[in-house]
Amino acid sequence: MKRISLLLGFVILAILLSACSVDNMELSKNIVAPKNINLPIEGRYLVEEFKISPVSAMTEEEAEIYIGKEALFHEDVVILGDNYCYEPNFKIKNVKANEYLIYQYKTNPELLNITDEEIQVVSVSGERQFFNDFIKLSDNTILVNIDGVFFYLRKTNDDVQIDKAELYSTTQEITLKAADSEKEISLDSAILLGLKAFKLDSGNSGLENWSYRTIFIRSVDKNIVSIQEMENILLPRMTGFWKVEVEREEKDGKVNDKIKAYPVNRGADISIKVRDEEIFRTEMEQISTSSTIKNILFLGNNYISIENIHYRNKGQRYLEFYPVDNINEGTPIKISDIMGEAGKEALLEGFNMEILSNNKESKKGLINFIPKEDSFGLFRRNGLWILRGRVNYIKNGDYVYEDFNIPAIPSQEIISYDELYIPWKEIKARRPDALDAFVSPNEDIAIILTRNEILIYPIEENAIGKEPIGKVQLNPGEKIIMAEWAIGRYPQIWEKEFVKEAN
């Protein structure tokens, strides 16, 4: 009986397997891999409202035109107003709302009524270029930024069946409409770039040192007409042009840097004097100001950010921020002096998030320190200036420091213009070796820095051109510390002044 039962079982199993094999063979010819199933955003949406950010390039009247416009998300195309993207690729990422909005759009979650700590961002890109980022607030509501304005879109229909002929007709109409409305405008753009390069002191000290120079670039109608350079920094200000220089003095085995900033028509009669300050308030140990070297981090119309290095003492490195007009007073300003209580709170928030939360010894109560209000500076990251704070403390008998991001937007008082109309991810897609970038307020040229070169690209149809129209060779390790744009009638004025000072 056991043998009969076992044989019967094998016969039944063979029949079942044969049946499955036949079914699989028949179905395999008809199975096609699904395309873009479960798109993160799908359907028809309507623009219902908007909020203008502090860095908006639109007026309220221009933003109003978008109200009532439709957006469509489909596996074959994404259409937003008069812009479209064929064969879109959708990428999803979850990011911290506060950090993403501040560093990507220079705004904060409160302005947009976002209360979640994390948000979902859907990036849409075509075969060759980035299209846009969409913040998914819910299954039926998304948020998109266009020229500094945040538009709220609500889903109106899940049905996105599209006729191919109708789709082609629609996109062709959008293209022709844009071409008809384009006007030939003479565009004149210029930029003054301040650069610094690290080097070792050629003297006996062998300490850190930096050389500084200024590059002037001017274009007319997306063609380069002038590229020039000069030693040190030529700073354009509302009161005219100033020069900024760093002088190093070695005496009696001590090294002292002086940063001089002065109007070009007055001569070098103003210099930074570094104040005596405490290493730590509890120790009351004074630092000698006669053995310091200085590293310029940022230079703008009104302020200068430096790293003050007490090299000959115990290697303390302090961040300090000075007004250009009153640098002879020698007292670094506090973040609350230029950004109010919100700036102070942002400094404490960044410190708590990045330093305290990651420092095991502070959690055990072994380290007791707080960030000083005057210990902050400006640094470059992904084509923008960002605020960073620094704390100095003693660890295992050594003086150490840690930097942290300050989740706040540098005010216009600090930086007059700092916009990337071409998204950073599109710049990286075009030039994967890009380390930094700047875009003209005219939106006609883009300046891209790689490790070895400054590349000037034309901007065509809101995208970076295929080939650069100009190049500048960089010195090893050279970085940007100043970027000031001129448009309209000012590029010619700046060029004339630059030539005069460079010769």
Image: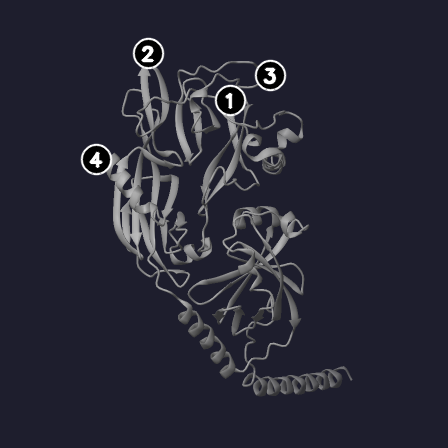
Residue at numbered disc 2: 252
Q: Looking at the image, is mark 3 or mark 1 nearer the viewer?
A: 3
Labels 3 and 2: the sequence-earlier one: 2
Q: Residue at x 55, y 74 (%)?
A: 35
Q: How much space separates mark 4 and mark 3, taking CA atoms?
A: 52 Å
Kindly give the residue lying farthest to the top in the view shown: 252
Quadrant of the rendered structure where residue 264 is?
top left
The amino acid marked with disc number 4 is Asn
Q: How much space separates mark 2 and mark 1, taking CA atoms?
A: 26 Å
Labels 4 and 3: the sequence-earlier one: 3
Q: Tell me the element at label 3.
A: loop
Q: Residue at x 30, y 28 (%)?
A: 265
The amino acid marked with disc number 3 is Thr
Q: Which mark is residue 282?
A: 3
Labels 1 and 4: the sequence-earlier one: 1
Image location of residue 248, percent across then percent down: 32, 22
